[in-house]
Image (spheres, rainbow, N blue to C red):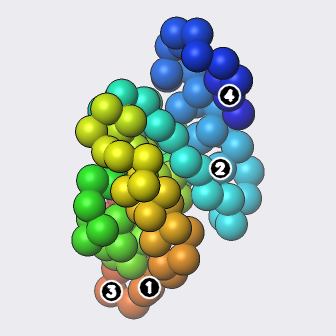
């Protein structure tokens, strides 16, 4: 959803665009990247039914899907290598929500 060049942008604009798109379907997944990953995370999580997870290692990435049914991954371009970020995206996309006791907790969010 952009940006499509290296010009500076206001990252919340893109976090909101992606969050709105993810909310359209339960099967949609979003990927957001900013310098730290934190700003995108905060902005995206302002939307109802969005569970954005800032992923910083394999365990946090996997658990964000298994236990929290995260539907957006946020990554920091200044704190992760491209190789790690791509690995985390792969894990995020290929890990399914466990459900069970976690479903009740998701409803409380």
**Gap between marks 4 and 2 measured at Cα:** 15 Å
**Gap between marks 3 and 4 measured at Cα:** 37 Å
Q: The residue tagged with tag 4: helix, strand or loop?
A: loop
Task: Please report the residue visible at 68 percent of the width from the left and 28 percent of the height from the top.
Answer: 2
Residue 17 place in picture, x, y as percent: 65, 31
**Gap between marks 2 and 1 measured at Cα:** 20 Å
Disc assigned to residue 99: 1
Residue on which disc 2 sits: 22
- Mark positioned earlier in the residue sequence (2 or 1): 2
Residue on which disc 4 sits: 2
49 vs 4, nearest the viewer:
4
The answer to whether residue 74 is left or right of residue 29 is left
- Mark positioned earlier in the residue sequence (4 or 2): 4
The answer to whether residue 57 is left or right of residue 41 is left
Q: Nearer the viewer, mark 4 or mark 1?
A: 4
Q: The residue tagged with tag 2: helix, strand or loop?
A: helix
- Mark positioned earlier in the residue sequence (3 or 2): 2
Q: Nearer the viewer, mark 3 or mark 4?
A: 4
Task: Please report the residue visible at 54 percent of the width from the left and 77 percent of the height from the top.
Answer: 94
- Mark positioned earlier in the residue sequence (3 or 4): 4
Residue on which disc 3 sits: 101
């Amino acid at each position: 959803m952009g940006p499509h060049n290296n010009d500076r942008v206001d990252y919340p604009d893109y976090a909101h665009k992606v969050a709105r798109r993810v909310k359209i379907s339960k099967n949609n997944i979003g990927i957001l990247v900013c310098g730290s990953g934190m700003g995108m995370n905060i902005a995206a999580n302002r939307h109802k039914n969005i569970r954005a997870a800032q992923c910083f290692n394999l365990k946090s990435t996997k658990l964000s899907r298994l236990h929290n049914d995260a539907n957006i991954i946020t990554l920091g371009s200044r704190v992760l290598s491209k190789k790690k970020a791509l690995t985390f995206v792969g894990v995020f996309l290929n890990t399914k929500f466990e459900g069970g006791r976690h479903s009740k907790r998701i409803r409380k969010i």
